[in-house]
Image: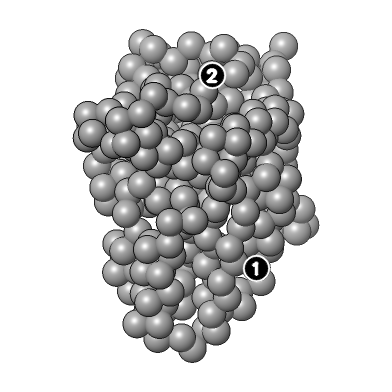
Amino acid sequence: MYKIIDGKFHSAEIRKEIAARAAKYKAASGKDIGLAVVLVGEDPASQIYVRNKIKGCEEVGIKSYASYLPAESTEEQVKELVQSLVDDENINGILVQLPLPKHIDQQAVLKLIPKEKDVDGFCEENIGSLCLNKDCLPACTPNGIMKMLERENIAISGKNAVVIGRSAIVGKPMAMLLLNANATVTICHSKTENLPEICRQADILVAAIGKANFVTNDFVKQGAVVIDVGMNRDKDGKLCGDVDFQSVKDKCSYITPVPGGVGPMTITMLLYNTVVAAERTLCILNLTKNTAIICNISMKNCKNSATKS
Ligand code: GUN
């Protein structure tokens, strides 16, 4: 019998923890935690994402600073805005909603965001730290998957994990997080030969390919944990994942549904990364002032700053 991993439930529980930590931050610093959200253009999907991110901030007591620029903005104008957010000490995290309009060099804009404020986990320094298994802010979707595995007490160390998909936002950081948790990791992609056979070795199978109902019964080992990152429309226009849920469910020990699995975790982990980013600045301030840590914040979050001070 399989168990459904309920992303809505985990997300709500984690948001309670985030709200408590945001309140503690305010009590210690006298300031709200700030998240800047930048949207360039009028892409309808991006507008919905941004709205939901701002709503999430309100729910947990993080102050959001939304900036909307027209699609015709020049790269210089976008960079100028991002630089002002980098320089603003009330802002702990910066999120530039992607994709940016085609005439803007995405990497050139993202490069301006320092590792400490990169709550999306997209900047090269954060990705490098993730690869080196050092403190970092990991990308939100894979970080949310790790959180769900942890909260479900699913063992990772020593297990075979197969990730289908090699995107910079999901597949690659997912593989790194699993590797850092001591899984034996295989990354598959569109050129992989014998894909079902490789996937059948997986104790943990993560599908992040963007193809509706692609993973079927013959991809799945008996007892596997199956994580579906897909957000697709099937031929009837219904929302569906990369995994054919009906076909694989009876082979799984755990499975995430679509909707209601991985999806609800992504914005929650953005809020989570923002709280962690804020707590780290507070630790730096306190340590450089050479005062006791006045806030009751986990020292784990102070690891980097402690070595800096
Ligand atoms: N566009 C689609 N997903 C994301 C995301 O997680 N972060 C950002 N910044 N843009 C996105």
Place of residue 169 in the rendered image (x, y in percent of width and height, measured from the top left)? 42, 49
Q: Are marks 2 and 1 in contact (CB under 8 Å)?
A: no
> Who's the residue at 39% across and 24% down the image?
292
Query: In the depicted view, which residue is nearer to us: 299 or 229?
Result: 299
From the viewer's perspective, is 50 left or right of 110?
right
Query: In the depicted view, which residue is nearer to us: 298 or 1?
Result: 298
Residue 52 occupies quadrant: bottom right
Query: In the depicted view, which residue is nearer to us: 309 or 65?
Result: 309
Which quadrant does the C terminus fall into?
A: top left
> Who's the residue at 70% across and 31% down the image?
16
Mark 2–mark 1 distance (CA, rounded to whole Å) = 31 Å
Amino acid type, mark 2? Glu
Say which label, 2 or 1, has the lower sequence index.
1
Numbered disc 1: secondary structure: helix
From the viewer's perspective, is 250 left or right of 143?
right
Place of residue 249 in the rendered image (x, y in percent of width and height, measured from the top left)? 68, 24
Q: Which mark is residue 47?
A: 1
Up the image or down, 9 lies above or below 76; here it is above
Mark 1 burial class by Cα count in 10 Å: few <14, some 14-19, many 20+ = some
Which quadrant does the N terminus fall into?
A: top right
> Who's the residue at 48% across and 67% down the image?
99
From the viewer's perspective, is 56 left or right of 118?
right
Place of residue 19 in the rendered image (x, y in percent of width and height, measured from the top left)? 66, 36
Residue 161 occupies quadrant: top left
Up the image or down, 270 lies above or below 205; here it is below
Amino acid type, mark 1? Gln
User: Label 2, on which residue?
Assistant: 150
Place of residue 120 in the rendered image (x, y in percent of width and height, measured from the top left)? 45, 50
Numbered disc 2: secondary structure: helix
Query: In the depicted view, which residue is nearer to us: 131 or 95?
Result: 95
